[in-house]
Image (cartoon, rainbow, N blue to C red):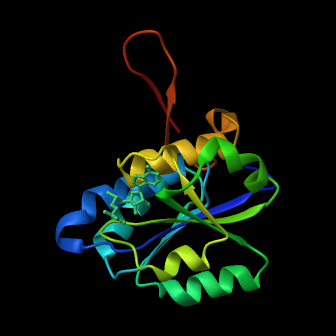
Amino acid sequence: MPGNEVVILRIGHRPERDQRVTTHVGLTARALGAQGMFLATPDKGVVQSIRDVADRWGGDFFCLDNVKWRSCIRDWKAQGGTVVHLTMYGLNLPDVIDDVKAHGKILVIVGAEKVPGEIYGLADYNIAVTAQPHSEISSLALFLDHFFSGQEFRNEFPGAHIRIIHSRAGKRTEEM
Ligand code: SAM
């Protein structure tokens, strides 16, 4: 999205059980307008899956694994960025999204297993997507849609080898 930079920091990923969900966190982030994902665990399988999709479907979404989450947050803030942590314990999304929109460079933290307590203090905003437990994929999708005000539906993905032509029925695609 022009003028905004949104990157995801995925923490707590367990390669033996979270590969599918973490890959979907990355694909959701990419489809809904984020620029990339830092993964705070080594997992080349997730990185490769996301790169395969980005190569075929376009855009320049990045995925970096084995990132140290403390230094990632520190560096982001040092560059003037804002840190958002999605947690059901935070302030409710509709109550804070206008404040967050005033910031152009956002790091969105999503967890897998229990998130270290330190994250709550490091985040500039702890944001709940309702006060009910659900998932990192749904919370991220709703956050991005609110942050981009629905404009992400119009995003283009330059360099794609394939694109879908929306249609009422059937599957229309164009190979480039
Ligand atoms: N049991 C974990 C805990 O207590 O931290 C949460 C696990 S949940 C399956 C994984 C992630 O989904 C959370 O770290 C959070 O980022 C996100 N999440 C789940 N429900 C949420 C909600 N209602 N609002 C915001 N984020 C949520």
Q: Position of residue 77 (x, y in %)?
A: 71, 80
Quarter of the rendered image showing ligand 1? bottom left
Image-quadrant location for residue 4: bottom right
**Is residue 15 shown to the viewer in this render?**
yes
Which picture quadrant has residue 156?
top right
Residue 160 in sight in this render: no
From the viewer's perspective, is residue 73 above or below residue 159?
Answer: below
Image vertical order of residue 148 relative to residue 115, above or below: above
Between residue 11 and residue 124, name the one nearer to us. Answer: 124
Position of residue 77 relative to residue 160, above or below, is below
The single residue placed furthest to the top in the displayed view is 168
- Relative to the observer, which residue lies in front, 21 or 99? 99
Where residue 144 appears, x then y in whole percent? 59, 47
In the rendered image, residue 126, in percent from the top left (x then y), is placed at 58, 63
- Front residue of 147/37: it is 147
User: How many tags in the picture?
Assistant: 0
Q: Residue at x 66, y 86 (%)?
A: 75
Left or right: where 151 falls relative to 169: right
Quarter holding residue 3: bottom right
Q: Nearer the viewer, residue 67 or 149?
A: 149
Residue sitting at x 30%, y 56%: 21
Which residue is at 51% across, 77% downward? 119
State the residue at coordinates (57%, 83%): 72
Residue 150 placed where, x, y %? 66, 34
